[in-house]
Image: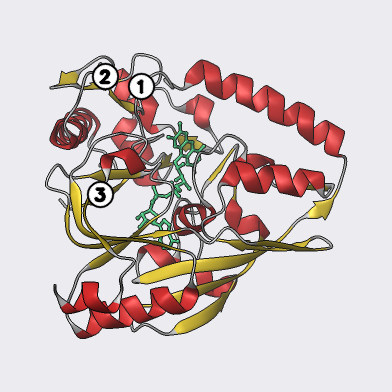
Amino acid sequence: MNELLKKFPNIETEYNLAQLTTFKVGGQAKYFLISDDLEEIQAVIKFCLENEIKYQIIGAGSNLLISDQGFAGLIIKINNKDIDVNDSRLKVGAGVLLFEFVNLALKNNLTGHDFLIGIPGSMGGAIYGNAGSYGNDIASIVQSVRIIDGQGNIKELNQEECRFAYRDSYFKHNDCLIFDVVLSLQKGNVDEFRKKMIERFKVRKNIHPMEFGNAGSFFKNIEITEDVKDKLNGKLDISKFDGKKIPAGFLIEQADLKGWQVGGAEVSEKHANFLINKNNAKAQDIFDLADLIKKKVFDKYGIELQEEVQYIGF
Ligand SMILES: Cc1cc2nc3c(=O)[nH]c(=O)nc-3n(C[C@H](O)[C@H](O)[C@H](O)COP(=O)(O)OP(=O)(O)OC[C@H]3O[C@@H](n4cnc5c(N)ncnc54)[C@H](O)[C@@H]3O)c2cc1C
């Protein structure tokens, strides 16, 4: 038995990752740990750093494409589900699912987090990618985030240090594990909030192809800069997106890619920015389909789509 497994008996081997993702594709992790124990996770990370073992964090797997070859290192799934409510301030474990958080906040008569309704991720994943919807994101309620950094040290980052931007953050550019987060909500009209929640669920159900494996919006929406306006001038009317972003799905649809398939993967007919696992897709099918979309959109409009979905093992 190797040193890693001897030292950390909770680590499993050859673990199937597909079941841990909403795409339901991907190979095995050589090593796998699910843990809610900060000390254990820190010790494991330090061991990996000292012994040059690659490691990667996952949450609820709703924004991930894991390769068919899997991951030849350690996958750590954060399972810290603690939530402490102190008036309108909440300390929330990275493993708490967003729907659990939304419901608990409601039970405590707290509002101001409606943009998280229906997002099937964990708190850690939401902080990593600054998740949101309807023009707002989680950055707006974050006070601080506790992490284990790329040297194995525990640190607390304040809001500014998190460098949140549209589907972006400090965490996307620096190795770190998000362990928990302090959020600030407001006391509010919970009945209004509930109504809003039901409405949004309905909208989501109508526009998202939930009958198939998917990982939400595959590509980021496009900031309307002068360069983008020049590129689309005379090709597409984007006036209806004034003051917003151009949905990536709009460009994909205009490039006539709805319904395109590679192997078992398809560009959803329901929502062009959703790639779906239509028929026992391989991760490679989804990867190749994404690549094809990027090439076609670039050839037609000169715009480079950027993935919102995160790749592991490619
Ligand atoms: C049907 C559907 C609808 C969606 N709608 C939306 C939407 O409206 N808005 C939106 O923003 N997103 C949406 N998503 C995408 C996804 O749910 C969010 O991005 C979510 O925040 C990802 O969280 P996760 O826990 O699933 O992260 P994962 O998919 O597990 O991981 C995503 C990335 O986060 C990193 N990560 C996860 N946890 C941690 C941690 N504790 N520490 C460090 N890094 C971590 C991983 O390494 C990976 O790079 C949707 C997805 C689906 C399937």
Quick check: marks 1 and 2 in contact, CB under 8 Å?
Answer: yes
Residue 99 lies, with reference to residue 128, above or below; the image says above
Position of 156 with respect to 268 (left or right) is: right
Residue 140: % across, % down: 65, 56
Question: For this rendering, which residue is in front, 189 or 108?
Answer: 108
Q: Secondary structure at mark 1?
A: loop
Q: Quadrant of the N terminus?
A: bottom left
Mark 1: few/some/many CA within 10 Å (<14, 14-19, 20+): some
Q: Residue shown at 62%/19% (left/top)?
A: 202
Q: Quadrant of residue 233?
A: top left
Position of 117 with respect to 194 (left or right) is: left
N-term mark: 3 or 1: 1
Q: Residue shown at 35%/21% (left/top)?
A: 212
Callout 3 amino acid: Tyr
Q: CA distance from mark 1 to mark 2?
A: 6 Å
The residue that label 1 is drawn on is 212
Residue 179 marker: none
Q: Secondary structure at mark 3?
A: strand
Residue 134: % across, % down: 60, 36
Residue 182 lies, with reference to residue 185, above or below; the image says below
N-term mark: 1 or 2: 1
Residue 311 marker: 3
The residue that label 2 is drawn on is 278
Residue 26 lies, with reference to residue 43, above or below; the image says above
